[in-house]
Image (cartoon, helix red, strand yellow):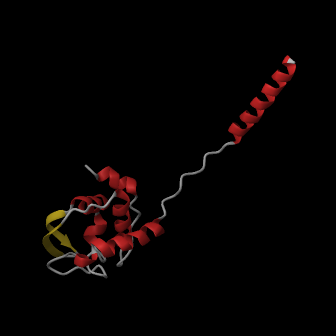
Amino acid sequence: MKLKHILFATGCAAIVGTALFSFKPQPQDKFDLKASIERGKEIYSTHCVFCHMAEGQGVEGAFPPVAKSDYLMADKKRSIKEIIYGVTGEMKVNGVVYNGEMKPTDLNDTEVSDVLNFIRNSFGNKGEAVVPTEVKAERK
């Protein structure tokens, strides 16, 4: 009787051991830049288009362009912070000086990532992805 229990326990242990040994964790999902850009397009049309315009051209002297923007593309961290906290004061964009204010947003980390991915990959811009963890890291 004891031998049956020992053999049964040994068999169960072998099955469990084999299952655990062959288990391979699934790779983490890669960031989907294309999906982020699509979501960002909607956010842009809700929060940004009124000042920066439909084609990202802005309004010279009042609202800086995001289209082909040297300022925007020069510093990803600065862009993240400006979306989160807003920005006031002088900035030079594509050779033109702007001195205004952009109010802070109430966008969450994913939304900030998405809208920046849209802007940084539209209107003649081409930039690397901004992921939500980068946004989270820039919050105070």
Image point (14%, 64%), residue name: 88
Q: Where 126 falls versus 32 (above or below)?
A: below
Image point (14%, 74%), residue name: 97
Q: Check the image and name the residue furthest to the front.
A: 1
Left/right placement of residue 27 relative to residue 4 reads left
Relative depth, front residue between 28 and 124: 28
Q: Where 102 falls versus 1 (above or below)?
A: below
Q: Where 55 falls versus 129 (above or below)?
A: below
Left/right placement of residue 72 relative to residue 9 reads left
The image shows a total of numbered marks equal to 0
Q: Quadrant of residue 85?
A: bottom left
x, y percentage for residue 139?
Answer: 28, 51
x, y percentage for residue 117?
Answer: 38, 67
Q: Quadrant of residue 106?
A: bottom left
Quarter of the N terminus within the rendering: top right
Left/right placement of residue 16 relative to residue 123 reads right
Q: Where 12 falls versus 90 (above or below)?
A: above
Q: Quadrant of residue 5?
A: top right
x, y percentage for residue 47?
Answer: 28, 71
x, y percentage for residue 76?
Answer: 31, 61
Image point (34%, 52%), residue name: 136
